[in-house]
């Protein structure tokens, strides 16, 4: 297995000057290459030697100090948002910016980025700002009673392209369980019923009963690419709302893909990320255990799972983030940078709701008056 690069000093950082006008080249989702936003120059991204995405040995990495990693090339400084606490990795030569997760101005002086396990693969953006705005607009148009000001978020292009840190985990699991199996069967039950005239009568009916028996056993399963978000800046339910990611399309990491976009530092480390992955695996294992028990009903009293051959990948996934403040509350809306699927919290315009209720009440009043006048 290829050993990770270990360094205690940040690299000088790569810059992408346009050979025609000298401006910075940004990654262009449409051409999947570098493009100058000023003169239109385009340039292909060469894959180079880093053409292989490898799975890293989990236990081997834990035996080392996580701090003995490196920084993301081209992101040699970082700053912590005073509003939400997110640690944003800044592009070289950018001193101040706004937090993509809460829109707070990042006034804190940037510091040298701390060493970390750097991402080794990335899903590049497939949607540019225009396409992301179109997806946002379609989502907005389906909302009832949304404040009019919310639409201005999309109209003004207040969407920020962000790469969020993720982990994937592979694990071969052996789960030993104990429980009970319930098998249904039908039985005839006799009962006495009192008739309206006071007489009693014995009757019968068919009932379903369950026979329980103790069981134990083992299930085995290999989990591949269990995905865990390494950010705490976006609620888990919003992340889940973005849908699945086309992980087979991962590209070996190159700083070119990050140019023009923001990047967040891992807030959930390798070990804690695996704890979350184990929780996700446990839900699937519960289903496997119940299937193995069989019968009509299952009671699972204990499951002991052993994880072996655990590997991981650090990676970055793309999304467009809009932050909207309404009545002293902050709302986040996310757009999947690959599929355009939107996931977000939406505010309600109580003015619009009140006007609708008032309109309905007025219409009902007019109908009552009209009916009353016709009846005279």
Image (cartoon, helix red, strand yellow):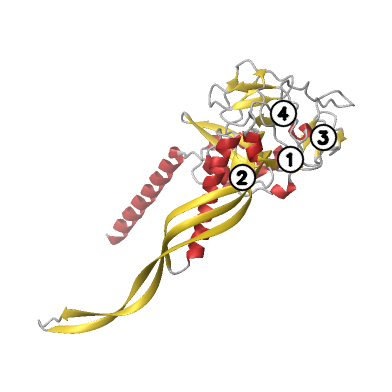
Q: Quadrant of residue 111?
A: top right
Callouts 3 and 1 close, C-beta under 8 Å: no
Residue 123 horizontal/vertical position (percent):
72, 42
Measure the alpha-carbon separation of dots 4 and 3: 19 Å
Residue 215 horizontal/vertical position (percent):
44, 64
Q: Quadrant of residue 23?
A: top right
Q: Tell me if I can see residue 242 in this picture.
A: yes
Measure the alpha-carbon separation of dots 4 and 1: 16 Å
Res. 72 mark: 4
Give SS at disc 3: strand
Q: What residue sits right under mark 2 in the picture?
A: 227
Instruction: Classify 10 Å Cα crowding around label 2: few (below 14), some (14-19), many (20 and above).
Output: many
Give SS at disc 1: loop
Disc number lying in front (4 or 1): 4
> Measured along the vertical axis of the image, is residue 336 above or below residue 371?
above
Task: Indicate left or right for 71 with 32 as reference.
Answer: left
Q: Earlier in the sequence, mark 2 or mark 3?
A: 3
Q: Residue at x 48, y 67 (%)?
A: 294
Give SS at disc 4: loop
Task: Indicate left or right for 30 with 196 as reference.
Answer: right
Q: Quadrant of residue 70?
A: top right
Measure the alpha-carbon separation of dots 3 and 1: 12 Å
Q: Nearer the viewer, residue 332 or 220?
A: 220
Measure the alpha-carbon separation of dots 2 and 3: 28 Å
Q: What residue sits right under mark 1 in the picture?
A: 124
Q: What residue sits right under mark 3 in the picture?
A: 34
Measure the alpha-carbon separation of dots 1 and 2: 17 Å
> Measured along the vertical axis of the image, is residue 51 above or below residue 300?
above
Q: Earlier in the sequence, mark 4 or mark 3?
A: 3
Give SS at disc 2: strand
Residue 310 horizontal/vertical position (percent):
63, 45
């Amino acid at each position: 297995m290829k050993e990770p690069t270990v360094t205690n000093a940040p690299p000088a950082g790569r810059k992408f000057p346009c050979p025609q006008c000298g401006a910075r080249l940004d990654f262009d989702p449409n051409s999947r290459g570098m493009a100058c936003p000023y003169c239109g120059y385009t340039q292909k991204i060469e894959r180079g030697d880093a053409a292989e995405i490898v799975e890293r040995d989990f236990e081997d990495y834990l035996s080392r100090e996580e701090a003995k990693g490196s920084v993301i090339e081209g992101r040699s400084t970082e700053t912590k948002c005073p509003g939400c606490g997110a640690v944003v990795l800044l592009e070289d030569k950018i001193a101040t910016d706004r937090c993509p997760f809460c829109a707070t101005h990042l006034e804190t002086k940037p510091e040298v980025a701390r060493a970390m396990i750097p991402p080794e693969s990335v899903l590049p953006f497939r949607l540019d700002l225009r396409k992301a705005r179109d997806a946002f607009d379609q989502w907005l148009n389906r909302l009832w009673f949304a404040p009019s000001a919310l639409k201005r978020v999309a109209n003004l292009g207040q969407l920020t392209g962000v790469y969020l840190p993720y982990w994937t985990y592979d694990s071969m699991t052996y789960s030993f369980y104990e429980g009970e199996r319930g098998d249904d069967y039908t039985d005839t039950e006799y009962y006495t019923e009192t008739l309206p005239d006071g007489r009693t009568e014995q009757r019968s009916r068919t009932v379903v009963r369950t026979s329980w028996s103790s069981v134990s056993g083992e299930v085995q399963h290999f989990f591949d690419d269990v995905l865990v978000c390494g950010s705490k800046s976006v609620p888990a339910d919003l992340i889940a709302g973005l849908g699945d990611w086309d992980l087979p399309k991962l590209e070996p990491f190159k700083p070119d893909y990050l140019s023009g976009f923001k990047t967040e530092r891992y807030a959930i480390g390798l070990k804690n990320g695996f704890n979350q992955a184990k929780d996700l695996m446990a839900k699937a294992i519960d289903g496997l255990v119940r299937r193995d028990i069989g019968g009509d009903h299952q009671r699972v009293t204990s499951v002991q799972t052993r994880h072996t051959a655990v590997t991981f990948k650090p990676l970055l996934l793309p999304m467009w983030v809009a932050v909207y403040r309404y009545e002293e509350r902050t709302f986040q809306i996310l757009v999947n940078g690959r599929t355009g699927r939107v996931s977000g919290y939406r505010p309600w315009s109580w003015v619009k709701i009140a006007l609708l209720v008032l309109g309905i009440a007025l219409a009902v009043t007019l109908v009552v008056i009209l009916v009353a006048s016709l009846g005279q």
